[in-house]
Amino acid sequence: MASERKTAPMRVLVTGGSGLVGKAIEHAVQQEGGKLEGEEWIFLSTKDANLVDVGQTRAVFEKHRPTHVIHLAAKVGGLFLHMKENLHFLRDNIKINDNVLQTAHEMGVTKVVSCLSSCIFPDKTTYPIDETMIHNGPPHDSNFGYSHAKRMIDVQNRAYFQQFGHRYTAVIPTNVFGPYDNFNIENGHVLSALINKTHKAKTAGTPVNVCGSGSPRRQFIYSLDLGRLIIWALREYDEIEPLILSVAEEDEVSIKDAVHMIADALDFKGKVHFDTSMSDGQLKKTASNAKLRRYLPDFTFTPLQKGIQMTCDWFIANYDIART
Ligand code: NAP
Ligand code: GDP
């Protein structure tokens, strides 16, 4: 998907470069020929700068002088962390996003692609949800802090365009999973938490405890697919309006389906318990990928079972370094 534009080589700063999505972009850049001649790609973590702090944000931009930014850094977590820490999600993400976007503006960055999330969509809505509907009503109560902070990126992007003509945009991935995810049982997202739980249950010969009823539905995107799509968006996507990056509506699965896929991948034959005293969160947030398909009709997504298998294999092989 790499194009051969005749412009000066990009110097791309990836914030959140050490996380699930950042590592996938790094893989596409370094292992799949995603980097064009003369380009420089810099992957940041909190060790390079705490982006909640404006001084540290400016210093790291001064150091690298990027022409382009992929902005992934965020306080991120699964449903149960959101329910405990809505205020931290709101404040940290507002600060990180304003620091990154305003510093990019002050330092003349040509393009920024930021990452929103499909969990920021209105709770009460019609389905499928598309890019025009982000602000049509309050988000689900479980993660309102994160959602409002993320929605403001879209508002801010429009304002930078209106006042300064900047092409700062955003993508909206659905639920992401893959190598380098956060596999922590309390704080992780559903697939990574359940992979870790199933692995532990298999070792201990105990049942797997799934939170909630198993009936909520999600569209899962494999991180390496998302990494390739974000690189494409940086090079080719010229709109300010966000773009949903998702598998098709018919590829949405229930949490129960996903549990079975994880059990297959880990060869787990024990019992599965659904703890209905725990929250289901949003029952669904079905997103349309029609706009993406207009741009990339032939993009091939990794089938979910295959992506889960590769993630489980990575988790077992990298247990010592995985975030647990
Ligand atoms: P992740 O694995 O938790 O990675 C988060 C990244 O942000 C890490 O590189 C982390 O650095 C960095 N970071 C966090 N706080 C920071 C701070 N104060 N200053 C500087 N860097 C900071 O998360 P992810 O899943 O890759 O998420 C990447 C983006 O995708 C986020 O914007 C998220 O909202 C979005 N997204 C994720 C999902 C999903 O299902 N995971 C779905 C939709 C959208 P350290 O490694 O040093 O901590
Ligand atoms: P969400 O998609 O933004 O709601 O975030 P998650 O990735 O945390 O997924 C939450 C959904 O998975 C809810 O329906 C939960 O009830 C369900 N779920 C089942 N087991 C787990 C688990 O161990 N951890 C998490 N985070 N969610 C789980």
Image (spheres, rainbow, N blue to C red):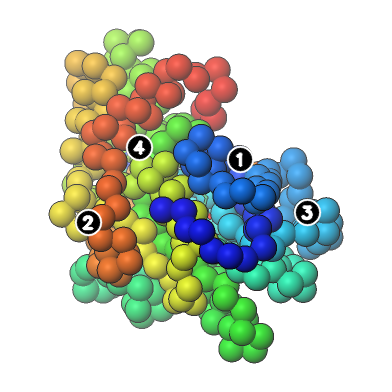
State yes or no: discs 4 and 2 in contact (Cβ < 8 Å).
no
Q: Which secondary structure lies at badge 2?
A: loop
Q: Which secondary structure lies at badge 1?
A: loop
Tell how many labels. Answer: 4
Mark 1 C-beta closer than 8 Å to ligand 1: yes
State yes or no: discs 3 and 1 in contact (Cβ < 8 Å).
no
User: How far is mark 1 from mark 2, CA to CA?
Assistant: 28 Å
- Name the quadrant where ligand 2 sits: top left
State yes or no: discs 3 and 2 in contact (Cβ < 8 Å).
no
* Sequence-wise first label, 3 or 4: 3
Q: Residues within 10 Å of mark 3 (few under 14, many from 20)?
A: some
Disc 1 target residue: 18
Mark 3 C-beta closer than 8 Å to ligand 1: no
Residue 277 seen in this snapshot: no
Q: Which mark is residue 191?
A: 4
Amino acid on which disc 4 is placed: Leu
Q: In the image, residue 65 lies at what x, y percent?
A: 78, 59
Disc 2 target residue: 248
* Sequence-wise first label, 1 or 4: 1
Q: In the image, residue 270 lies at what x, y percent?
A: 21, 16
Amino acid on which disc 2 is placed: Ala
**Which one is nearer the viewer's eye here, 316 or 109?**
109
Q: In the image, residue 43 lies at what x, y percent?
A: 65, 45
Q: Is residue 67 above or below residue 281?
A: below
Amino acid on which disc 3 is placed: His
Query: Mark 3, mark 4: which one is toward the viewer?
Result: 3
Query: Mark 4, mark 2: which one is toward the viewer?
Result: 2
Amino acid on which disc 1 is placed: Ser
**Which one is nearer the viewer's eye here, 253 or 248?**
248
